[in-house]
Image (cartoon, rainbow, N blue to C red):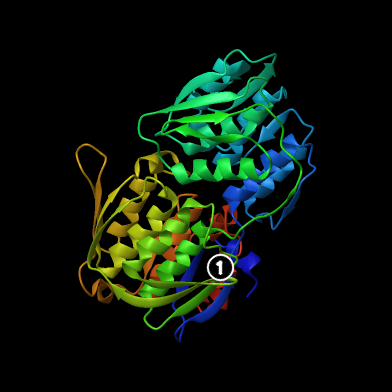
């Protein structure tokens, strides 16, 4: 089957393999590592050798826009690209207008713009205050070398600031206020910065210090994507006797989503690291668990769908940032799992959630389930593994291009039927 034609369809149906899965899958490379490395490379004048860059649309958009000589940079729906380029353009004195899709223009950027203005950047909003599109109007010099920024909204704001900070005359001390969310992503940024020669580190629990300097052009190989790996963990958990080898993953990964190994050890997957990656095998599952997603929010949809379908009661925290992603992912998951009788219940203070799974043998009441994807790649990929239980219809399958373009091709390779 031509997967390009398949992705162009308004809807596809996914059915489970006719026999137990035993596959080796080459995952896409990490979008997170790729996009950070590309900003660092641009600051060296594109002198680095970056190996295994992601084929995800977000990364390809970043590559294209970093090379663009046009005044308008359209990031499409790529949140990381918008935030990283906002800081890069502002603090390197590039006069650009940054815009994106309708949804992108609803995603806040005020915290980052406020911080850049404090440092000395001149930035205007072109439509709604606090949201793209924005115009970067120049940087004439550094006004402050110590600023504060909330740590509990988006780690991408923090990464955007510190990656460019070595090129500020006085460097930057960045204090993070409140609870620090997605901290492994900040640590990933710092480790990549050090990989390329920057002096950047946490000097206390809440303060990052970046000393002035430059990046050293060097070679770096991007790891496979742990976020993309999570959907295979879900598949193995749902299918008894299954075994999947995922290639290109590292035991000492910089990516916070390696936490999927620990999470899924309770939810039906035994993991064994090998030289080329990791082997997943089905194992026993707990019926109740609790998980904090503060450091790995991109894993939440996968786990919610799995628990809802597999009869696992799960208490969750750390989902707050899902409200401002490609869609409101909390609301979207609440709607979709209700289709088969499960619930995602939010407490009154909106800081804790509970998955109430579907009734036992729920699948006997359906021939298939229709799922919407909300123009969100992770909705499609988190819900597709439920085809192990019951055929699922996925609307707008092309959304996977954002981070994992070969997702449907890899499912076919593992024996799934898609039509």
Query: Residue 128, position in %: x, y?
Result: 51, 22
Please tell me which residue is depicted at 37% across the width and 65% down the height of the picture.
Answer: 264
Crowd around label 1: few <14 · some 14–19 · many ≥20 (10 Å)? many
Residue appearing at x 59%, y 55% in the figure: 30
Using the image, determine if residue 74 lies above or below residue 252.
above
* Front residue of this view, candidates 38 and 231: 38
Q: Is residue 60 above or below residue 129?
A: below
Residue 419 visible at all: no
The image quadrant where one finds the N terminus is bottom right
Seen in the picture, residue 324 relative to 176 is either above or below; the reply is below
Where residue 314 appears, as percent x and y from the top left, is: 25, 58
Whether residue 289 is visible here, answered yes or no, is yes
Residue 390 in which image quadrant: bottom left
Q: Is residue 325 left or right of residue 294?
A: right
Observer-nearest of 414 and 416: 414
Q: Quadrant of residue 259?
A: bottom left
Q: Is residue 229 left or right of residue 197?
A: left
Q: Outermost residue, bottom direction?
A: 19
Q: Residue at 39% of width from left, 47% of height from top?
A: 329
Q: Position of residue 171 (x, y in %)?
A: 62, 24
Residue bearing the label numbered 1:
408
């Amino acid at each position: 089957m031509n997967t390009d034609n398949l992705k162009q369809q308004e809807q596809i149906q996914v059915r489970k393999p006719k026999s137990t899965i035993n596959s080796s899958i080459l995952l896409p490379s990490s979008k997170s590592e790729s996009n950070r490395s590309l900003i660092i490379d641009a600051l060296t004048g594109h002198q680095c050798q970056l190996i295994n860059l992601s084929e995800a649309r977000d990364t390809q958009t970043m590559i294209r826009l970093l090379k663009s000589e046009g005044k308008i940079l359209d990031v499409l729906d790529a949140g990381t690209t918008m935030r990283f380029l906002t800081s890069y353009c502002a603090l390197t004195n590039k006069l650009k207008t940054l815009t994106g899709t309708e949804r992108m223009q609803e995603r806040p950027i005020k915290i980052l713009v406020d911080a850049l203005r404090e440092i000395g950047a001149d930035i205007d909003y072109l439509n709604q205050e606090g949201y793209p599109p924005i115009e970067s109007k120049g940087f004439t010099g550094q006004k402050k070398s110590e600023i504060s920024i909330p740590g509990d909204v988006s780690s991408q704001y923090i990464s955007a600031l510190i990656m460019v900070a070595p090129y500020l005359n006085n460097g930057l001390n960045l204090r993070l206020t409140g609870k620090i969310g997605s901290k492994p992503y900040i640590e990933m940024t710092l480790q990549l910065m050090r990989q390329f020669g920057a002096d950047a580190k946490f000097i206390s629990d809440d303060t990052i210090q970046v000393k002035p300097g430059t990046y050293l052009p060097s070679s770096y190989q991007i790891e496979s994507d742990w976020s993309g790996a999570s959907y295979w963990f879900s598949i193995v958990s749902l299918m008894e006797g299954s075994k999947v080898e995922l290639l290109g993953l590292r035991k000492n990964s910089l990516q916070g989503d390696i936490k999927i190994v620990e999470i899924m050890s309770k939810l039906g997957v035994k993991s064994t690291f090998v030289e080329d990656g990791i082997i997943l095998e089905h194992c026993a599952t707990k019926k109740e668990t609790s998980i904090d997603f503060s450091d790995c929010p991109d894993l939440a949809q996968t786990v919610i769908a799995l628990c809802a379908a597999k009869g696992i009661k799960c208490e969750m925290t750390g989902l707050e940032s899902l409200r401002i992603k490609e869609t409101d992912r909390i609301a979207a998951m609440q709607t979709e799992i209700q289709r088969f009788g499960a619930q995602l219940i939010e407490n009154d203070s909106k800081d804790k959630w509970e998955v109430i799974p579907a009734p036992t043998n729920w699948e006997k009441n359906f021939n298939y389930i229709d799922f919407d994807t909300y123009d969100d790649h992770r909705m499609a990929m988190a819900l597709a593994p439920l085809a192990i239980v019951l055929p699922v219809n996925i609307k707008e399958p092309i959304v996977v291009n954002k981070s994992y373009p070969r997702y449907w091709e890899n499912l076919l390779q593992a024996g799934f039927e898609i039509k």
